[in-house]
Amino acid sequence: MEERAKRKWWKEGIVYQIYPRSFQDTTGNGIGDLKGIIHRLDYIKSLGVDIVWLNPIYKSPNDDHGYDISDYRGIMEEFGTMADFDELLKGMKQRGLKLVMDLVVNHSSDEHPWFKESRKSCDNPYRNYYHWWPAEKGKPPKRWSFFDIEENAWKYDPSTKAYYLHCFSEKQPDLNWENSKVRQEIYDLMKFWFDKGVNGFRMDVISFISKDTDFPELPEEYGGDFIPYYANGPRLHEYLHEMNKEVLSNYDVMTVGEGTGISIERALDFVNEDREELNMFFHFDLMDLDREPGQMFTMRKEKWKLTDFKRIHSQWDSIFAQKGWGSIYLNNHDFPRAVSRWGNDSKAYWHNSATMLQTFVLTMRGTPYFLYGEEIGMTNIKFNDISDYRDINTLNRYETLKNEGGDLEAFIQNEKHASRDNARTPMQWDLSKNAGFTKERPWIGINGNYEEGINVMTQESEEDSVLNYFRRMIGVRKSNTTLIYGDYTLLAPKNEDIYAYTRSDSKNTFLVLLSFSIEQAEINLKELDFEHARLIISNAEAAELKKDTRFALEPYQAVIYQLH
Ligand code: TEU
């Protein structure tokens, strides 16, 4: 089969996501900083990754840890200075690493000068930078907010007797994209960073930027589910195309949208090359798999099924088989750790499941994304007490529930698996105090399992560590473009224990076998030809190749064979 996709660096690159607050502290304030990332650049390079995505590092009062920006051209004081940023970028370029920043322009901070002006008076030149609903029109139609204790996205501002819209916290007012001046401001700030040499943007809730500014009552078809409604704004594609024409098309950069609420049917509207909008986006179908329907922060009681996991990935792959390009991820700063969620983080299965999941991400078609610490198999911290949590999402939902007299114990049990803080605990570097992250008190608790082998230093010294497997597996992907561009074919779709597929092109066929089972599991692959098969990699003793094609895999085993 021919390679149908045009080769691009952002299709072949592997992305490493850094939550700067938790990566490496060098100043002793318990918060990670840019100098810390600079200090660790050789390590990052040693992983074999190509692209670093940094969560927001701009000036921010940190209501939502940087997703509330008060100056799009300034660096958060805790993280350092613009000189540090320039040094970081230079250090990355010297090592051949690319830098992708977070673009958070659905909303700003309420401490951004635009909002401070906007709220001053109804005739202020910045008034229309945000969405205002005058109280004289009565109460605005219901809009739901993610982080509001009353779950209300309209906040009344007495100074001008009007409500402003905030789909996230009340300190994150939504920008008004209808206003062409706002759009120009955003395009200008994008150019500012591109002109510095930044290689792309991950675009925060980019699907939410367009709103029906009449703010009608929510159409019934949404049945109380706000997300798809927020993601279906009337001028969304017009804005993305305009952004592409005015900015993106002038640079060799990559874009990955956060595709909150984007359904598979609409996927190509965003990433079909001919439409000139985005390169990729993150879909949420997998992230929703183990959540109660319509309740994005509550885990389901019953376990998710591997057949659903396969179906989701196979469906999304088929969409991008002809046009566009996908992104493959199992976690990020908003979701629990991959090994705890999709694998098994108990001692006996942790190593195999962490490496099996890495094998999955690195053998799918689409750009692979890893969250810092995933390379060493970092796990959920499962905080017991509300006072341990730092995330506005957990803290404010707790308040909401408390006000309603809800079950707070059940809430904490849920957060142990669901909270975003699971993914945000400090990087585990070594066996020294605080895992080598900081010399002082860290801003959030550190997972004690750094003392039990989940740290970089220990894993550097072990040939078979999760870390060294990650490096080897990256080597496998990099030396075989078939694993990047080749066709994907699902095998044994009904098998609930093993995920099996081939990746093939005219030159090669690779067979990938991944066990998601806690027990030995079997698969029958009689349709395949093993005549010339050879083992490429396995995270455990590889199954012996027999012509009878019945394979038994160890718990959470991953194995790749090249068939021809
Ligand atoms: O997340 C938007 C989004 O869709 C999330 O609310 C997601 O559903 C949730 O975090 C799942 O737990 C982005 C950022 O990634 C997130 O960190 C920010 O808090 C949010 O936007 C507001 O900027």
Image: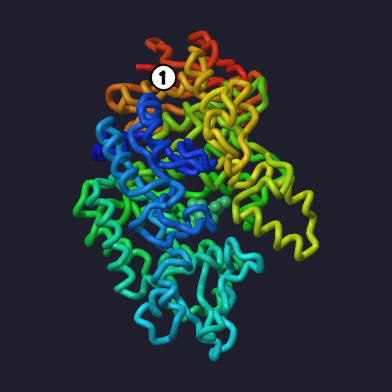
- Tell me where residue 388 appears, x and y as whole percent: 68, 45
- The total number of labels drawn is 1
> Residue 121 location in percent, x, y?
44, 85
- Residue at 59%, 28% in the rendered image: 433
Residue annotated with mark 1: 472
Q: Residues within 10 Å of mark 1 (few under 14, many from 20)?
A: some
Residue 194 can be seen in this image: yes
Rendered view: 391 above or below 344: below
Residue sitting at x 44%, y 64%: 108
Quarter where residue 335 is shown: top right
Label 1 CB-ligand 1 distance < 8 A = no
Residue 514 visible in image: no
Left or right: 489 in relation to 441: left
Look at the numbered disc 1 and give the secondary structure of its residue: helix
* Relative side of 506 to 335, left or right: left
In this view, the residue in front, 449 or 211, is 449
Q: Residue at x 32, y 47 (%)?
A: 324
Q: Residue at x 34, y 43 (%)?
A: 84
In the image, is 554 to the left or to the right of 268? right
Percent position of residue 430, x then y: 53, 24
The image shows residue 257 at horizontal and vertical percentages of 39, 52
Coloration of the structure image: rainbow
* Amino acid type at mark 1: Arg
Q: Quadrant of residue 366?
A: top left
- Compared with 412, 161 (above or below) is below
168 or 538, which is in the foreground?
A: 168
